[in-house]
Image (tube, rainbow, N blue to C red):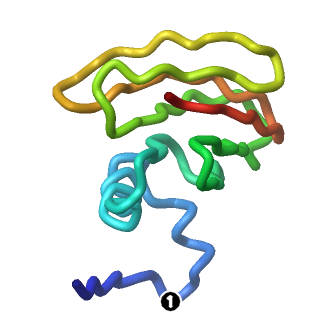
Amino acid sequence: MLYVLTIPENPGDLYALPAEVLDEIRRVLTADLDVRLEGPAKVGLFVYDNNTFIAESFLPYFSDIKIVVEKKNAGLVDLVSGEEISGQTVGERSIFAIKMEPTTYRVFQYS
């Protein structure tokens, strides 16, 4: 499948897109992955093949993101702290609300 994404003349303007627009772009571009990110610009998702991923905030302030796992009743563990994060099952996916500190990353594993 071929997608065409029209971007501003200045690629830096992508950071000004609303979170809802970015979420839709992320949903389409990560359709083949088991996990995706919802939230503001300047937050990245680095996915690995062993059910682990890193969420990194490049923002200078606290932010709230959602991690969406394409699996019903999935579990999510912060691998640094060992904290088990509770989520919500919506249809065939699990959604986890995560608070990100400024300019930090968090490492997770889902099951």
In the displayed structure, would residue 88 be above or below residue 92?
above
Residue 46 location (% of width, % of height): 65, 55
Q: Residue at x 55, y 22 (%)?
A: 76
Near-viewer residue (97 or 85): 85
Q: Position of residue 65 (x, y in %)?
A: 53, 32
The front one of 28 and 43 is: 28
**Helix or strand or loop: what does disc 1 sit on?**
loop
Residue 33 falls left or right of residue 55: left
Quarter where residue 91 is shown: top left
Q: How many marks?
A: 1
Q: Is residue 56 left or right of residue 87?
A: right
For image coordinates 80% across by 34% down, the residue present is 102
Callout 1, which amino acid?
Glu
Is residue 25 rendered to the left or right of residue 78?
left
Which residue ends up furthest to the left in the rendered image? 91
The residue under the point 70% across, 11% down is 83
Residue named by callout 1: 9
For image coordinates 63% across by 22% down, the residue present is: 99
Please tell me in which quadrant of the rendered image residue 105 appears. Answer: top right
Image quarter where the N terminus lies is bottom left
